[in-house]
Structures are given as C-alpha cells and as structure tokens.
Image: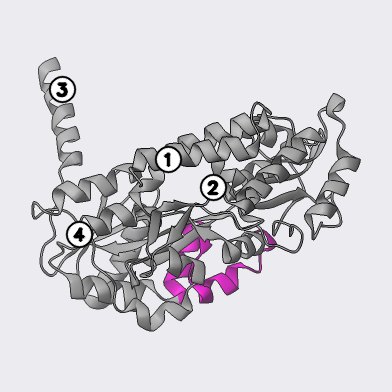
Amino acid sequence: MKRFLVFLVLLTILLNTVILASEAGKLLIWTDEQRKPILENLGKQFTKIYGVPVVVQELPFGDIRDKLGVAGPAGEGPDIIIGAHDWLGQLVVNGLIEPLNFMEEIKGKFVKTAIDAFTYGNKIYGLPYATEAVGLIYNKDLVPTLPKTFAELIAIAKKLTHPEKKEYGFITQASQPDPYHSFPFFTAYGGYIFGKNPDGTLNPCDIGLASKGAIKGAYLLLSLIKKGLVPEGIDYQTMTSLFNAGKIGMILTGPWAIAGAKKSGINVGVAKIPTVEGNVPKPFVGVQGFMVSKFSKNKALAAFFLRDYVATKETRLALYKADPRVPAFKPALEVVAKDPIVKGFAENIAVGIPMPAIPEMSAVWTAWANAITLFCTQKETPEKALSDAVASIKKTLKCH
C-alpha cells in the first residue's frame, strides 16, 4: 500500500511538471501561480467569445525563462509567456521570442517607460502588463506637508530625527548596501548603469557608475549618514517595522510596503521622489508583460489575443482587480490612478528607467554593492570605491 501511495505521489509530481506543447488552434500560456487563476478566467471568456481553447500552465516565475530556452527549440512549450522585461536580453539574443509588430500601432496607449522596457534593438517584444518602482512613502500624520525638493526633505528629517528614541524623519535602505534602492541617488545628477549603442541597445562596456554624476549622487547618500539622519546599513525589515510603528516620517521603497503600513493603521501616502537641485531622481522600473514564443504554432492567433482582447480597458481593469499592480495600459491607469497610492507610484514610474535588460547586468550587482559598503562605511571615498567597481565589472565582462 505504501509503495502504491509513493507511486501516486511521484506520478502527480511528474504530471504537474510535464511541459505542454503549442498546438495549432489552441493557445497555451505559461504563467506563475499568482496569475494563473486570473488568466484562466480570461481564457474562459475568450473561448466563450471566439471559440478558441486557452490552456494556462503554471510554472514557478523564475523557471519560465529558462524552461522556454529548453522547450521552445525542442518543439514544445507555450504560445505566450508572462515575464519580466529584463528577461529580454537572454530571450532575444537566443532567438526565443517574436517581436510584436502590432505594438507599433498601439504603443501610444501604454506608459512610455513600459514600452521602452520591452524595446530591444528598436523592436517591441512584449505587451506591457504591470509596472513597479520605488517612491517616497510617507506618514501623513508626521509629514503633513510634502517636500518638493531634497533640501526640504532633509529639513523635515532633521526635525523628526531622534536616534535615541529610534525616531527618524527619512530612512532609506540604500546603504545596506542595496544598489536597487540607491539608484535614485546615482541618477539624481546624471549617473547611469550602461550607455547606449546607436541602435538603442545597451552598451555593456559603457559603464556610468563612476561618472561625475554617479559620484555626486554617492556623496548625497553618504551625507545622510554623516549627518546622522540615516543609520548606516539599516535593512528593509527594520525600516518598515519602525515605519509601521509610526516612528519614521518617510521611507524610500516600493508598493510591497503599503499593505503592512495600512494593516498597522498608518495614514500612508506616496509621492514622487523630491528633486535634487532641480534634477529628477530616476528609480529603476520593473515591467511585466506578455511575450510570444518564437516556436509558437499560433503566432497570428496569439497576436490577436493580445492586441484585441488583452489590450483593452475592460481586460486590464479585470487584471488589476485580481492582481493590483500599477497598470501599464493608460486607459486602465487613468481609472485606478484615482487612488492616490497608485497615482504616487505611477508618477515615479513615469520618470523612471527600466532595469537594464541585458545578461551583463548580472556582473554589476555585487561590485556595485561592495562599492556602496566601502563608501558608506567611509573606508574608501566614493571616487575610489566606484572606480574600482567599474574596473572590476569591465574585467568580468572582458571590456577593452
């Protein structure tokens, strides 16, 4: 009996991991657990209207990209995947996804940052679905008047900061080190990760982390530590715990912190990151969207599904209701941005920079984080720490 039960368990696992194959006249979509119920519901509606079967297969989000690389060339795999825009480098270079030519006709209906995120070599490879970026999250009871400039933010922070009581006016985990959250400081004066080639693709050997603007931004971050306004190395959990306890006026993070703040009874708001000497800090923007497999047997049908069914206000609002992420589709965004929380994040997304969508980005994170640690602990100057980081990245990438 035990052997039979073990056999059943193994058979169930095997069946759940079988990769389905694209079939003519039937749409197969790969997505993760969170979005599967949403897409199944949309698929049923599409089938009811057009008579086309839609099968939704669940895979762990982190596995979708790599499994497509194996299944697609073998004649298996989906017609459509939902994934992150920063998968593009690997997917496009390896010839795994199709450019979506119809997007040229309707790209004006989408947030420009989202279109930029899914553009590679002047071609659009994805229909953007949802966007996210960090913003200035604040406690309205402690900060009734929003700072419009970073100088005003610092002035407010000084009044609210009492380290002995673990009370702070402004906290960022950027110095943890956290390159993702530090990016707005680096871009405030024009710093960047990668420059661009003439065709619009990123140039991995043009690294701007030690440019004059990036170094000036590093000094801005360092100044918050030197002034005693931000504890060096504070992590996300500590920061959000204090914020949710009503002990921090403002924090720099993303929408994932909102639910906890609301649950804790914080009168929470979201605003654009204040300007720095007239410059607009640009956060990283992450975009998720629909992409079509190069190996799909239903490319025209997949394009129809995306263009005429998914890219509609009704479908986008249904997606938002089931999974409330800031929409990339303007007609839907105009509706949900009546919520000031959504509006605040949308304003940061609009000025943000898509996370670099090339494989070489993986060589950046560790060297960049090490540099942040070195200059935030004042073991090295920002100039030396960042210059060494760039040299290390270029060596890894074999740039000459």
Q: Which residue is mark 4?
A: 95
N-term mark: 1 or 4: 4
Residue 147 in sight from this viewpoint:
yes
Image location (x, y in percent) of residue 323: 48, 56
- Amino acid bearing label 4: Gly
Q: Nearer the viewer, mark 3 or mark 2?
A: 2
Could you tell me which secondary element the residue under label 3 belongs to? helix
User: Mark 4: few, some, or many residues within 10 Å (few <14, many ≥20)?
Assistant: some
N-term mark: 1 or 3: 3
> Disc 2 versus disc 1: distance between alpha carbons?
10 Å
> Disc 1 versus disc 4: distance between alpha carbons?
26 Å
The magenta region covers: 313-341
Residue 174 in sight from this viewpoint:
no
Q: Are marks 1 and 4 in contact (CB under 8 Å)?
A: no
Answer with the quarter of the image where residue 38 lies. Answer: bottom left
The label number, if any, that marks residue 5 in the structure image: 3
Q: Which residue is mark 2?
A: 209
Which residue: 46% across, 59% down? 195
Q: Nearer the viewer, mark 4 or mark 2?
A: 2
> Disc 3 versus disc 4: distance between alpha carbons?
42 Å
Could you tell me which secondary element the residue under label 2 belongs to? loop
Image location (x, y in percent) of residue 85: 39, 57
Image location (x, y in percent) of residue 69: 19, 49
Image location (x, y in percent) of residue 354: 48, 58
User: Mark 1: few, some, or many residues within 10 Å (few <14, many ≥20)?
Assistant: many
Relative to 103, say whether 185 is above or below: above
N-term mark: 3 or 2: 3
The label number, if any, that marks residue 286 in the structure image: none
Q: Which residue is mark 1?
A: 393
**Residue 161, magenta (yes or no):** no
